[in-house]
Image (tube, rainbow, N blue to C red):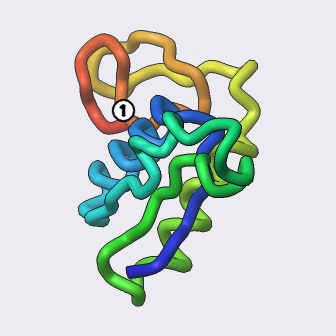
Amino acid sequence: MKRVYIAANLMDAQMMVDVLGTQSIKAHIFNANASGGVGELAATQIWPEVWVEDNELAAHAARLLREIHSADSSENKPCPHCGELNPRNFLSCWNCGGILG
């Protein structure tokens, strides 16, 4: 297993795991329950981390997550299935769930 992302919070970590899942990359969240240690642990120890199971996919997974965070979300793109506008950094349509190209 290899760490590919350090999240700001648990929801961010879960969203990244879900994104990787859409690409058939198995990932897990570590430190999901460590927030109870705030004040007792160093801040870097309580941030949720996303780890991928397959080390060979780690570089691809990290690159994918970087692209998602660097995408210009101010632009929209239409869904090829239903035509609904979605933020540029979405991988699937919020309306119909179709994969965006």
The spot of residue 98 in percent (x, y) is 26, 30
Does residue 90 appear left or right of residue 27 in this picture?
A: right
> Residue, x 31% and y 11% (percent of image)?
95
Farthest-out residue, bottom: 56
* Residue 70 image-quadrant placement: top right
Label 1 residue SS: loop
Badge 1, how many Cα within 10 Å: few under 14, some, many 20+? some
Residue shown at 52%/48% (left/top)? 48
**Horizontal and vertical percent position of residue 45:** 63, 56
- Image location (x, y in percent) of residue 79: 39, 23
Q: Position of residue 82 (x, y in %)?
A: 29, 15
| 44 in relation to 52, above or below | above
Q: Is residue 101 visible?
A: no
Instruction: Relative to 66, say whether 36 is above or below.
Output: above
Instruction: Tell me the residue that label 1 is attached to.
Output: 92
**In the displayed structure image, the side of residue 72 where residue 81 appears, left or right:** left
- Asked whether 58 or 22 is in front, the reply is 58
Q: In the rendered image, is residue 17 in sight?
A: yes
In this rendering, position of residue 82 left or right of residue 100 = left
Count the labels in the image.
1
At horizontal 40% and vertical 42% (from top left) the residue drawn is: 33
Q: Is residue 95 above or below residue 54?
A: above
